Amino acid sequence: MAALAALAVTSLACAESAFTPTRMDGGAGSAIAIAHWQIQSSAKAQQSGAEVSSAGFSARDWYTVSGRATVMAGLLENGQYGDVFYGDNLRAVEEPDSSGNLFVIPWWYRTEFALIKGARETRTLLRINGIISSADVWLNGHLVAEQATVAGAYPVHEFDVTRWVHAGSNTLALRVRPADPRTSLSIGWVDWNPTPPDNNMGPWRGVDIVRTGPVQIRFPQVTSTLSLPDLAHAALAVKVQARNLDKSTHDATITGVVAGVLLRRTIHLAPGETQTVSFSPKSDPSLDLNHPQVWWPVGMGAHPLYSLQMEAAVDDAISDRASATFGIRSVSSHLTQQGYQQFVINGKPVLIRGAGWAPDIFLRDDPKRMEAEFSYIVNLGLNNIRSEGKLEDARFYDLADRDGIMILAGWECCDKWESWAKTGGEPWDASDEKVAAASMASEARLLRNHPSVIGFLIGSDNAPPAGIAKIYLNTLRAEDWSLPIIAAASDQATAETGPSGMKMAGPYDWVPPAYWYADQLGGAFGFDSEVSAGASIPPLDDLIRMLSPQELEALWKFPQARQFHASAAWSIFATIEPFDTALSKRYGSPKSLADYVAKSQLENYDNVRAQFEAHNARMDAVRPSTGVIYWMLNNAWPSLHWHLYDYFLNPAGAYFGAKKANEPVHIQYSYDTREIMLVNHTLDGEHALQAIIRVRSLDGGVSYERRLQNIDLAGNAARALATLPALAGLSRAYFIELELASANGQPISRNVYWLSTQTDELDWAHSNWYLTPVTRYADLTPLQSLPTATSEVRATMRHEGAEDITTVTLTVPPSSRAVALFQHVSIKRSEGGELMLPILWSDNDVTLWPGESLTLTAHSATPSAATPVVEVSGWNVPTRSVPVAVASRTP
């Protein structure tokens, strides 16, 4: 907090900044997003909406912010609070100023937009894509809508404002009401991170200016019925809504092109009338496609997309345009014999391997970051994202469509969205139900064309009561929703949807790797909707960026200390004591912060790998695993909990453990049965594979070796390859080394485990909703006695297109005294410079024995002007830096 002492939290005056009005040059069928706003607290701007939305109003001392900025995001854009991500600086923002809390009163959003001449010849619409929590809307001195109408984070509101606009400059103002997720259907954060001081108030999804003729077309939709199992035919059904905005009758000709098929229909619209215009193989036989290009999830096939383009014409003039992108695929789900959800894509059952999505804590819009995060998801080998509320806009789903990432979307828990589930909680009133229905309708229209979306969870921790479930179901049906509708992410049901087929039995805090192979609670059976071993410790450089010296010291010295960056302050997860205790018991008490981080990366890798591998192993079991959602994928802000990569996009132990487990074709060890398993997540069978199984003592000596050849592995399947025998004479800590190669010897999968002859033992009887206690810990402390190993490093870089591709070869010479355990490779832009991030590695955190060599590749999108440096560190390998030999770049 000391770092914020000099900030003027009690004064929000800011220097005048340049403001450029949004310019709408397009004619009928065009839309443009408001690019910038000017914002100010109503405590300072006490004028009426008529005055604020008038052309002569002075906003000289207001803040200029981007088009989708919440209040807090806008203040950060204007440099008001410095680095709120460091230490406990965010607490200073939460403290009231001399006039009270800044965020419990309305804020004004004001902007100007210019219309070209002809504003009266076309119609102008105002589209508000969601407001947290509600707003009064004013335009050129006129009240367009009151906050009771414009409410909710997700409903899209569209207003015909033609009578109030004119050619030239127009002024729009929103009086945004304070947000509180406990009392409004907005966005809450539970225990993921601290609550944003403003509760995310503002037009978080933006506002658009829309131009159309007398007949508007909207909500274009394409559904496909795919023939199974041959995938040889697809019947397309196309719908679009046409509405007459005029007070006079119009004939409109609706035309379109979809998958190369021409569509045409003429309709008659009475004043103010709305019609749904439909096309199907019955009316247009060409919509029955032969040999369609089928969309598959990542790893199972390609992800081709089709487009729909539509126009409405009145009196031979274009009145409006609409478009959509879609994919042809089949999605269904059913309950297994044990009652769990099994998703089936294009006739093939699929093991859902996903993680929970978190947007930025201040809901800041960053297209480049989102693009980078999707590249990480693909690199991790995941095939799914679960969104628990905090649902994103079309760009998110476009990226998922492109990359083949399936999306399970749904509402969130623990605030107004599930207030009816709390003991003594408040039921919803009629206005809540209205917002909920509008939210469901808007999200259905946004999601239904995207092939990546495979279902919607109408409840999170709790299934909605009958009346609310009916609202959701009726709304989805009205919007032609064709995908699975799931009661909740927990093991609950509604009369309308039946059982959820999901389980939410924990854990959320540390458990040993062997936990995941159990046959109870969060073990690998059924569909785990959110589950992980809790703490995920960022690399040392990032810890220094996010924690104060006092917090850093507490992190490795005092496990019971509450950490502001662990979870919400009130939460049981505000300490990471279970993780720290296990770390000390299993690997030895930390000797320093660096030692703590090194041990944490080893632990995170091992545990995350085991979670995914256990579900891999059971995908074909009698009691099968059908899905696992790691909690979570990413963080809303720098955190010590729940992520596969940290807020700074720096991949570390958890990331590479998940990446290893989710290889397309993979070899793995089972903690429960000692079986060596082969897993194939692709649809293509593998033949004549070769495998090597080795058990090594701590000194690297081989205690057991078995070579197998001519191995067949079916597609979309797992099989047991062999079982390790009980071995006498092993060192207390030992290694298992697994290799899988093709018939011609090309490496496919390589996997190394560090284990103890003293296994972890769990106290299942005393489990709670977030962890299972451990009565005995595995003893991996002998790893501390490994002698120093030698690792040689060679690195080269070449430039291809927009990428730098770095090749790093690690070699442990035969003369080295020991295994080189857990070598981590990173690239810096220059000696002592910043890390090259984001970055996509072929593999990392690798272990090599004397005489072994391994080549890794890394793709980075940002070329470095200086000479990059590769830095290699390891458990028992001294850190060293090696300049990268850079090939000359072609222009």
Image (tube, rainbow, N blue to C red):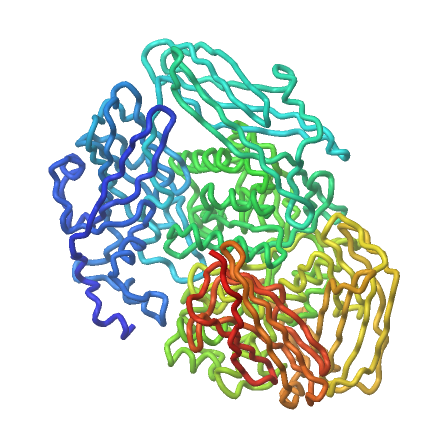
Residue at image x 42%, y 79%?
552
Q: Position of residue 183 (x, y in %)?
A: 37, 47
Residue at image x 43%, y 81%?
554
Residue at image x 77%, y 46%?
337
Q: In the image, is residue 176 above or below residue 707?
A: above
On the question of residue 190 being in view, the answer is: yes
Tag count: 0
Q: Position of residue 777 (x, y in %)?
A: 66, 80
Please tell me which residue lies in front, 519 or 245. Answer: 245
On the question of residue 574 being in view, the answer is: no
Q: Position of residue 53 (x, y in %)?
A: 18, 36
Please tell me which residue lies in front, 197 or 339. Answer: 197
Q: In the image, is residue 395 above or below residue 215?
A: below
Residue 695 position by quadrant: bottom right
In this picture, residue 272 sits left or right of residue 687: left
Q: Position of residue 570 (x, y in %)?
A: 42, 66
In this picture, residue 112 sits left or right of residue 403: left
In this picture, residue 325 sits left or right of residue 619: left
Residue at image x 75%, y 75%?
736
Residue 652 position by quadrant: bottom right
Residue 737 position by quadrant: bottom right
Q: In the image, is residue 277 above or below residue 454?
A: above
In which quadrant is the N terminus drawn? bottom left
